[in-house]
Amino acid sequence: MLSTLQKSSIFSFARLASTVTLHIDGVKSIEAPVGVRLDKVLKEQLPGFKNSCNGGAVCAKCVCEFGADDFAKLPAMGEDEADCLEDVELEGTNRLTCQMKVTSDMDGVHLKY
């Protein structure tokens, strides 16, 4: 298991390697390191962002709505994520941020949480 210092170092290194800009709620823009799980980026940079299953795709607390034009830029949705979104009756451009890593294709994406 990684220590807090190791996790922080990994996250810091990822930030230096390559980042993309994400636009949040039409108000704020953040830099997100490519390769890091999106919920971890949002939790670190946005007060009030919550998740409680730590990537298990079961709580749906990390759900975000993406702009219709940006939805196609996201990584493919897995079966666990689709099942979770169906269980909580969310459709459209909603995704679980714990189920995707930031990719270079996500640069400029708009999302609401």
Image (cartoon, rainbow, N blue to C red):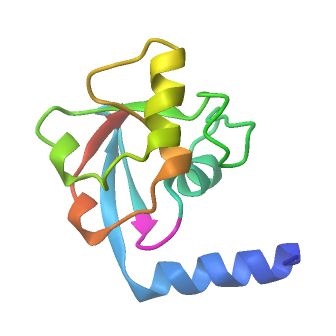
Image-quadrant location for residue 48: top right
Q: Which residue is drawn at 79% across and 83% down?
A: 6
Image-quadrant location for residue 84: top right
Q: Which of 25 and 79 is in front in this view?
A: 79
Give the answer, above or below, for where 59 lies relative to 47.
above
Q: Residue 64: image x %, image y %?
A: 43, 32
Q: Quick one: which residue is furthest to the left in this view? A: 69
Left or right: 6 as drawn, with respect to 102:
right
Q: Residue at x 31, y 56 (%)?
A: 75
Examine the structure image and report whether residue 33 is included in the region drawn in magenta: yes
Left or right: 110 as drawn, with respect to 32:
left
Quadrant location of the N terminus? bottom right
Q: Nearer the viewer, residue 77 or 23?
A: 77
Label the magenta part by its dominant secondary structure. Answer: loop
Q: Which residue is drawn at 42% across and 47% down?
A: 78
Q: Which residue is drawn at 56% across and 48% down?
A: 98
Q: Nearer the viewer, residue 1 or 78?
A: 78
Give the answer, above or below, for where 71 lies relative to 83.
below
Give the answer, above or below, for where 16 lies relative to 65.
below
Q: Residue 26: image x %, image y %?
A: 28, 33
Give the answer, above or below, for where 20 lies relative to 80.
below
Q: Which of 113 and 86 is in front in this view?
A: 86
Image-quadrant location for residue 28: top left
Q: How many marks?
A: 0
Q: Residue 96: image x %, image y %?
A: 48, 38
Magenta residues span: 32-36
Q: Residue 23: image x %, image y %?
A: 30, 45
